[in-house]
Amino acid sequence: MDPVKLLKQQHREVEALFKKVGKAEEADERRRLMEEIGQKLTLHTKIEEEMVLEAYEEHHVVKLVLADLPSVDPDDERFEAKMTVLEELVEHHVEEEEDEMFKLVDKLDDDEVEAIGDRMAEAAERAGAPVGKKRVA
């Protein structure tokens, strides 16, 4: 299992969900998408934190916004504002991660990379997200 490939796949899935939220007109759909984003980000941050302690602080801020979102009505203007803040936090983190942290993986030997990928895949599966399979909403 390639850990960088897995994390990049998760990044693309969350980016696609943010786009769907922006287009969703029904409050129920917006809430469902927000919950799906929360589930995916929770899994992603858990996996990353097991591998890279540096990511911990950035994830803390994302977790604060995720914890606040369920109490906001999707029809309230604050919902869109909070989703925008969450999206910007995630975009920044993805950019930094893909531009800087993933380069560190190149310095590891193949066996070490494989072991990290396997641990990430196991963590994802324990959390109910089969690796390599996209969940259809």
Image: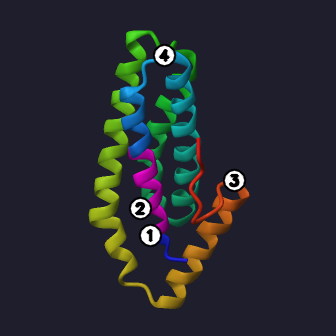
To which residue does mark 4 refer?
74
Q: Quadrant of residue 95 in the image?
A: bottom left
Q: Position of residue 42 (x, y in %)?
A: 57, 45
To which residue does mark 1 refer?
5
Q: Quadrant of residue 84 in the image?
A: top left
First reached walking from the N terminus: tag 4 or tag 2: 2
- From the viewer's perspective, is the residue at label 4 or at label 3 nearer? 4
Q: Nearer the viewer, residue 19 or 68?
A: 19
Q: Secondary structure at mark 1?
A: helix
Distance between the Cα atoms at labels 4 and 2?
Answer: 28 Å
Distance between the Cα atoms at labels 1 and 3?
Answer: 18 Å
Q: Amino acid at mark 4?
A: Pro
Distance between the Cα atoms at labels 3 and 2?
Answer: 18 Å
Marks 2,1: beta carbons within 8 A: yes
First reached walking from the N terminus: tag 3 or tag 2: 2
Q: Amino acid at mark 2?
A: Lys
Q: Main secondary structure of the magenta part?
A: helix
Q: Residue at x 32, y 45 (%)?
A: 91
Q: Position of residue 6 (x, y in %)?
A: 49, 66
Distance between the Cα atoms at labels 2 and 1?
Answer: 5 Å
Quick one: quadrant of the N terminus? bottom right
Distance between the Cα atoms at labels 4 and 3?
Answer: 26 Å
- Stretch in magenta: 5-15
To which residue does mark 2 refer?
8
Question: Can you say whether 60 is above or below 76 in the image?
Answer: below
Q: Nearer the viewer, residue 20 or 37?
A: 20
